[in-house]
């Protein structure tokens, strides 16, 4: 026993070190469901590696040693003896029932069982509404052994309690000897204890099959690996070497005593027969039927605990398309709507990334989860992406895959199968897939129009200042929709202003045949206190919401901005050039004339320092502003806002070399706010060659309103007409 304990301790240390050395992130959930006493842990089985690390994880979480059933083929020679020392029991051990039942009765061991009986590499579990497992060319139900073990344990516990209660000492002593209880005190405790079944689900994300360091090392030592082992090393080696999130969910315990009742059962508990054969338990006590009912219940619980992730959603969508050619935008739109609906469904577990903003699916900003999935589908030869469309390889989707190859050859099928037991999730995805594309676009457009409206009204109500805040129509984002036109412009206003600043330009372009969305940058159109607390990333997000509206309204888009809005427009075009036909920048502030702006960061630091000291005097939070358009702009300029503007323009300046979209740079020659050299510097720094610089004589900064603005409008319209014309 000492040697066994030593080996187990060493193994735990080795496993802990191995887990830390890999890039796997093991997260356990539902620890509140773990019982204080013994339990039968029933777990789904997808990889070979979980047979080694999962007992360690469960023992650590539950605080109790574990017996685990392992296939008889492992139990030969020194390795078999090593497994036995760790608490593994062979499926062919004639004493396995006594050993496992004894551990559960005594309360010193729980048990871990894979009811599927093998790895389920295809995750295909449902057939005609029933749980069925592929095995040796046929499909069979999952094993009922875990249910039988729990029922048998509770039956013997009830008999022991009866023996103690009636004073049947021979029965008590025989049970103590048979089940390894070394004192009557333990027997009494055993009679008052209970054993439950705890469903456990293990979900991996992402699952990828690639050549990796693990299988490369294996090839060094083994000249020709069996194909089955090669597949396992490609899939599981990639998980370990490249990183995988392993979510282990413990479900609410199931009490097997709910399935133990009836006259026959009560009679057998009260008689003095010590042992009952497996056959008599199954038939005479009807444990076979009850174990089957238990199996159905814990299998449903296991798969209800699946941690739903992005790959599940993307896989289901790709599977359910009937078309060979799929628009990337339509795919992302449906994925977004599906994720939005899924989050409203009461689910037992979802990946942490589903709780983050999903709108990056719609904005053409990088979405790592989507790109990773698409790369995997491409490398597997399942799809080809070209010209904004996904082309499915129909042969690969209609092919019948070998059980041991499917994880490597078509992970999309595997992930789709995993969602089948989650009927509510699969139903939500199915409902989205039944929508026509035009209705999908309309729902997303209306969703973001409403979101932008709610955000503005909430900000306006929160920060409203009598005598300072302008009327709501000044700050409200505007949408001028030109029906039957496929061209759209995203318009972005300047610093301390509001959408009203670019409305005249928007209306001019609307009359010229364009659909226009006038963005409201967060912190604007309300009060200076609102702007004081905003970051430049929120301005960028504001433009993203407008982009989503416009993208789901027209086929061709351009982005244009004035002053700080031009900086946001440039950054939009830099990050997602493929979304826009062109960019128009008007008086973008790469360099600001006011020398005080360069001191803003220092002032912000000084204000923060005084805040930490809880000193109210000596702070300079706002400076006076005397705007050209007094009906639009703020009269106070927050110092923190100026610092944020400086920070943002530094970001834009460094990225201008990456701009490849056709660009028109408009700059007033005597701009009193933005240094007129800004236009030329932006033009020179832009990485693309399709660019124009238009330098107009103007002594004002706000050239999109009032005198001379019509000249700017005409120049912008002429450029847009050329850039948005059909490509030859």
Image: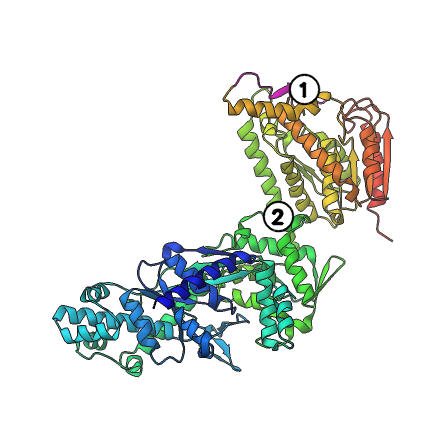
- Which disc number belongs to residue 359? 2
Q: Can I make out residue 286 in this image?
A: yes
Q: Secondary structure at mark 1?
A: loop
Quadrant of the frame with the N terminus: bottom left
- Which disc number belongs to residue 138? none
Task: Identify the residue at the far top of this view.
Answer: 617
Picture coordinates of residue 580, whole percent (x, y): 76, 46
Q: Secondary structure at mark 2?
A: loop
Q: Which quarter of the figure has residue 550?
A: top right
Picture coordinates of residue 84, whole percent (x, y): 40, 72
Total count of labels? 2
Residue 618 covered by magenta stretch: yes
* Residue that label 1 marks: 625
Type of secondary structure dominating the magenta stretch: loop
**Residue at x 45%, y 76% (from the top left corner):** 78
Q: Which residues are magenta?
A: 616-630
């Amino acid at each position: 026993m000492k040697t066994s304990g030593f080996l187990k301790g060493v193994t735990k240390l080795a496993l802990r070190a191995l887990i830390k050395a890999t890039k796997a992130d093991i997260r356990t959930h539902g620890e509140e469901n773990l019982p204080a006493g013994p339990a039968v842990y029933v777990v789904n089985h997808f990889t070979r590696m979980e047979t080694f690390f999962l007992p360690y994880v469960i023992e650590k979480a539950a605080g109790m040693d574990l017996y685990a059933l392992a296939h008889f083929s492992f139990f030969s020679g020194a390795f078999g003896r090593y497994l036995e020392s760790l608490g593994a029991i062979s499926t062919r051990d004639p004493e396995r029932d006594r050993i496992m039942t004894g551990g559960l009765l005594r309360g010193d061991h729980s048990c871990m069982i894979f009811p599927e009986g093998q790895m389920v590499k295809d995750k295909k579990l449902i057939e005609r509404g029933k749980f069925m497992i592929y095995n040796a060319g046929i499909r069979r139900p999952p094993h009922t052994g875990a249910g039988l073990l729990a029922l048998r344990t509770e039956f013997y516990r009830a008999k022991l309690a009866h023996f103690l209660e009636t004073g049947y000492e021979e029965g008590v002593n025989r049970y103590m000897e048979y089940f390894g209880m070394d004192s009557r005190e333990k027997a009494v405790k055993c009679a008052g204890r209970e054993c439950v079944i705890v469903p456990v689900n293990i979900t991996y994300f992402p699952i990828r099959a690639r050549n990796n360091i693990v299988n490369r090392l294996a090839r060094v030592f083994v000249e020709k690996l069996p194909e089955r082992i090669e597949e396992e090393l490609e899939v599981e080696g990639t998980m370990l070497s490249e990183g995988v999130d392993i979510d282990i969910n413990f479900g609410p315990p199931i009490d097997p005593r709910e399935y133990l009742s009836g006259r026959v059962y009560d009679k057998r508990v009260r008689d003095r027969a010590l042992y009952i054969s497996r056959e008599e338990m199954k038939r005479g006590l009807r444990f076979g039927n009850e174990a089957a009912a238990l199996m159905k219940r814990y299998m449903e619980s296991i798969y209800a605990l699946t941690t739903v992730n992005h790959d599940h959603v993307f896989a289901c969508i790709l599977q359910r398309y009937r078309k060979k050619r799929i628009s990337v935008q339509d795919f992302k739109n449906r994925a977004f709507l599906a994720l939005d609906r899924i989050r409203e469904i009461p689910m037992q577990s979802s990946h942490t990334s589903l709780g983050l903003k999903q709108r990056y699916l719609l904005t053409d900003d990088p979405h790592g989860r989507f790109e990773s999935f698409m790369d995997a589908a491409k490398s597997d030869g399942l799809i080809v992406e070209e010209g904004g469309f996904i082309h499915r390889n129909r042969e690969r989707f209609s092919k019948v895959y070998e059980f041991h190859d499917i994880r490597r050859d078509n992970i999309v099928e595997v992930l789709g199968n995993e969602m089948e037991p989650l009927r509510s999730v699969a139903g939500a995805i199915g409902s989205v897939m039944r929508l026509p594309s035009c209705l999908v676009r309309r729902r997303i457009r209306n969703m973001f129009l409403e979101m932008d409206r709610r955000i503005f009204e909430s900000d306006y109500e929160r920060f409203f200042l009598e005598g300072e805040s302008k009327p709501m129509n000044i700050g409200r984002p505007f949408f001028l929709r030109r029906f039957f036109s496929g061209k759209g412009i995203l318009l972005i206003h300047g610093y301390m202003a509001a959408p009203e600043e670019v409305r005249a330009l928007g209306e001019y372009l609307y009359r010229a045949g364009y659909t226009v969305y006038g963005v409201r940058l967060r912190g604007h159109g309300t009060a200076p206190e609102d702007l004081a607390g905003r970051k430049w990333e929120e301005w960028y997000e504001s433009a993203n919401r407008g982009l989503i509206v416009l993208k789901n309204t027209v086929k061709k888009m351009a982005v244009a901005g004035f002053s700080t809005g031009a900086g946001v427009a440039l950054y939009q075009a830099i990050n997602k050039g493929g979304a826009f036909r062109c960019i128009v920048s008007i008086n973008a502030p790469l360099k600001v004339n006011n020398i005080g702006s360069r001191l803003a960061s220092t002032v912000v630091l000084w204000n923060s320092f005084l805040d930490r000291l809880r000193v109210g005097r000596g702070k300079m939070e706002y400076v006076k502003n005397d705007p050209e358009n007094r009906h639009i702009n703020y009269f106070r300029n927050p110092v923190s806002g100026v610092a944020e503007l400086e920070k943002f323009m530094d970001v834009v300046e460094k990225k201008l070399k990456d701009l490849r979209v056709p660009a028109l740079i408009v700059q007033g020659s005597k701009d009193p706010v933005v240094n007129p050299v800004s236009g030329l510097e932006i033009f020179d720094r832009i990485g693309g060659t399709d660019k124009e610089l238009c330098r107009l004589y103007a002594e004002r900064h706000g050239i999109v309103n009032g005198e001379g603005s019509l000249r700017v409008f005409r120049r912008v319209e002429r450029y847009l007409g050329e850039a948005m014309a059909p490509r030859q």
